[in-house]
Amino acid sequence: ILNVEQSPQSLHVQEGDSTNFTCSFPSSNFYALHWYRWETAKSPEALFVMTLNGDEKKKGRISATLNTKEGYSYLYIKGSQPEDSATYLCAFIASNYQLIWGAGTKLIIKP
Amino acid sequence: DAGVIQSPRHEVTEMGQEVTLRCKPISGHDYLFWYRQTMMRGLELLIYFNNNVPIDDSGMPEDRFSAKMPNASFSTLKIQPSEPRDSAVYFCAVDSYYGYTFGSGTRLTVV
């Protein structure tokens, strides 16, 4: 059974602080890992598509790393702002194109 | 490019009625996905198409659900007859190099 876990489930961060959270996924049959940002009442927005072990990607204050051998990815947010409040989802795509979503990390930025 | 367009945005129907959800995907993408999002189960893949052909419909809850993609620019998800437990937000998405692009979703309420 393929399982994708995200931790923590929720996170309260003071505005201006940096934070990070984790997505754990199977280390076999890896094809890709996606990160999404999902605000309430909107559709998920793709942040990163990661395919290679050791990948590091950056988009403004948000960055992500990938370790396919040990099966984890970190998402970092530097200098959190209120608009960063959202649920961050990771999705593991296996080599047979099966896609498995994590349950998400709900991030709340406190002003 | 207007993105992935779903209609209607909101649908309220009575139990037992037929419901049809529509998706107009971005052109040039080989894969189209239908997802359902509920508070209890999160984001679930219902079915996906490759080049208009259904590939995996194992996520379709039961025979009351059916999906079609008659051409590359249009897909429908039909529920007949609808039940209150079908109430959810239904998303259509296409794949891209940058990840999945989601439509804005259809919020279905079955009373």
Image: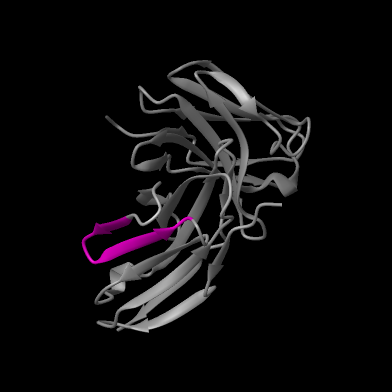
In this picture, which residue range is highlighted in magenta? A56-68
Q: Can I make out residue B107 in this image?
A: no
The one of B53 and B77 positioned closer to us in this rendering:
B53
Does the magenta portion include B88?
A: no
Which residue is drawn at the image coordinates 50% and 57% (left, top)?
A69
The one of A40 and B14 positioned closer to us in this rendering:
A40
Percent position of residue B36, x then y: 60, 45
Q: Quadrant of residue A37?
A: bottom left
Percent position of residue B18, x then y: 69, 29
Which residue is drawn at the image coordinates 37% and 70% (left, top)?
A85
Q: Can I make out residue B87 in this image?
A: yes
Establish if A84 lies above or below B69. Answer: below
Majority secondary structure in the magenta region? strand
The one of A105 and A44 positioned closer to us in this rendering:
A105
B81 sits to left or right of B67 = right
Which residue is drawn at the image coordinates 55% and 36% (left, top)?
A97
Q: How many marks?
A: 0
Which residue is drawn at the image coordinates 52% and 50% (left, top)?
A92
Percent position of residue B64, x then y: 76, 31
Does the magenta portion include A62?
A: yes
